[in-house]
Image: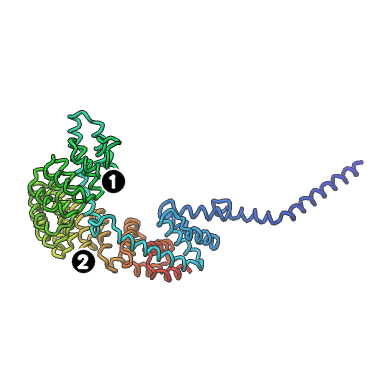
Amino acid sequence: MMSRVRWRVSLLFVLITLSIFFSLVANSDRFVEVRGNETYNQTGDGGSSENRIISLINRLETGNQEAKLNAAAELGKLGGPAANNLVDKIESNNSSSEKMNSYMLLALLETGDDRAENILSENFERIEASNRAANESAAEEWKQGISEDTLQAIEAKDTAIRKYIANSIAMDSARAENRGEAGAFEKVLNSETQNSSTYVPLAISDFGPEEPGSETEKLLKALKSNKGSTRVAAVMALGEMREEAAVDPIIGILTRDYPPAQASAAIALGKIGDERAVEVLRKEMKDNDNEYVKSGSAIALARIGDEDSVPHLINRLRDPRIKVRSSAALALGKIGNETAVKPLIEILETGKSSEGKKNSSMNANADVRKSAVLALGEIGSTDATESLIGILTDKEEELEVRTAAASALGNIEDPRAVEALKKVFDDNNMDTHIRNTAFLALSKTGDQETARTLVGKLGDQEFGDVAREALIDMGEMAVDPLIENLKTEDHKLKAETALILIEIGDKRAIQPLILAYQ
C-alpha cells in the first residue's frame, strides 16, 4: 500500500514539473520582455523605455542648468528611440518655450541621429527670422538703442513721479474723507506695470452707463472733471494709449492745473511723443516751481527725442534741484548729442571727493553723478573715456556710481575702455558687483578677443552664468570662438557651448555641431 502511495506522489510530482516546464516554454516571450524591462528599470525611473524617455524630456523643462544638461546627455545614450520622440516634439512645435526647444535640439545632437542636421537647419532659419522680427519691433521706439541700466534709471524717474502723485492724491482724499477711492488709485499709480486699462475705470467712474461716446471721448471729457484724481486718471490713461487727440487738452493741464496733475501731464506727453508739446515742456522744465513737474518735463523731452532741446537740458544741469539735474543728464544721454559731453564731464569733475573729504556741491550727489555717467555712456564719445575710467577706479566714489561707469564704458568703442574693463575684471580684490558689471560690459564691446575671454569663463563657478548670457547677447560675434570650444574634451563644457550656439542660431555652427557629436 505504501509503495502505491509513493508511486502516486511521484507521478503527481512529474506531472507538476511538466506543467511548469510547458508553461515556461509557452510564455518564454513574455518572460524575456519582463526580464528586459527589469534590467532597464535598474538604470531608469520609468516603467519602460518609453516612460523613461518622456520623463527625461520633461526634465529638460525643469530644474537647473546642470540637471537639464544631464537629461540631454541621458537622452543621447538612449539613441534612436529617444531621437524619434525628440524629433516628433520638435517638429510639432510642442515645447512650452524656446529655451526648452534648444535643450531638445542639444539632446537630439547627443543621440547622433542623422536627422539632426536638417532639423538644426530648419530651426536656425526660424531663430534667425525671430531675431530679425525682435530687432525690428523693439517694445517702444524711444527705448531703442538705450542700455538697460539707462532705461531703468529713466523709468525710475517715472516711478518717483507717480509715487509723488499717489501721495498727493491720498492727502487730498484724506481731507475729503474719500480714502477708499484713493487707495485704489494709489495702487494703480504705484504698480510696476502701467497700462491704460487700469486707469480707464477710475477716469470714467463719474459717468453713468448711459453716457454717450467712445472710451476715448469719455476720457477726453474726464480731463475737464472738477476732481483732480479723475483728471489725473484720464491723463495717465490717454498717455498710455498714445492718444494724439489728447495732446492739446493735456498741454492745458500741464500749464494750468495743480502740481500732481501737471506731473501726470508731463509723463503722458512724453509717452505720446508729439512735437507739439516740446515748447511747453521746455518752459515748464525751466520755470515750474515743482521739482517733479520739472523732472518729468525733462524726461518727456528725452522721450520725444528733440535735438533742439539739448541746450535747454544742458542749462538744467545747473538747476538748484537734484532731481532736475539728474533727469536732465539722463535726458541728454537718451538724445545722444555730443555737445552735452563737456558739461556732463564737468559735473563729474566738480563733484569729486578729494583725500577722503566729501565734496559738498550738488554735483557730488550719487544720483546726479550716476545719471551723468550713464548719459556719457549713451552718447558714446571717446572724449569721456578717461573720466569714466577715473570714476571706475576711484575708491572714494559711491559703489553705484562706479558700477554705472563700468556699464557706460561698455558702450564706448575705445581700446582704452576695453583694457580698463579687463583690468577691473581680473582684479580679485575688486568688489564682486563691479567685476560682474565689467564682465557684462565687455560683452557689449563687440570684440572677438572679448568673446574668447567670455568663452574661457563658461566653466567658471562664479562667472559661468554671466558669460553664458553675455555670449548669447553678443550673437554672431561669439560664434567662431564658440565653435573652437566645441573641440574640448570636457563633455559638460561642450554641451554648454553647443547650447549657446543653438540659442544664437547662426548657420555657420551647424556643421561643426554635427561633427562634434558624430
Q: Quadrant of residue 412?
A: bottom left
Classify 10 Å Cα crowding around label 2: few (below 14), some (14-19), many (20 and above).
Answer: some
In the image, 481 versus 453, the foreground residue is 481
Say which of marks 1 and 2 sits in front: 1
Tell me the amino acid under the disc marked 1. Thr
What is the CA distance from the residue labelled 1 to the residue labelled 2? 34 Å
- Give the answer, above or below, for where 93 lies relative to 117: above
x, y percentage for residue 190?
25, 41
Q: Quadrant of residue 259?
A: top left
Q: Is residue 299 left or right of residue 55?
A: left
Q: Is residue 478 left or right of residue 310?
A: right
Residue placed under numbered mark 2 in the picture: 413
Residue 369 in sight from this viewpoint: no
Q: Is residue 39 left or right of residue 197?
A: right
Please state, as top left, top right, bottom left or bottom right, where the N terminus lies in the image.
Answer: top right
Residue 96 in sight from this viewpoint: yes
Question: Are the two marked residues, 1 and 2, in contact with CB atoms closer than 8 angstroms?
Answer: no
Classify 10 Å Cα crowding around label 1: few (below 14), some (14-19), many (20 and above).
Answer: few
x, y percentage for residue 170?
20, 34
Give the SS element for disc 1. loop
In the image, 488 versus 201, the foreground residue is 201
x, y percentage for residue 176?
19, 29
x, y percentage for residue 266?
17, 47
Tell me the amino acid under the disc marked 2. Glu
Outermost residue, top side? 177
> Which labelled disc corresponds to residue 204?
none
Give the SS element for disc 2. loop
Q: Quadrant of residue 486?
A: bottom left
Residue placed under numbered mark 1 in the picture: 193
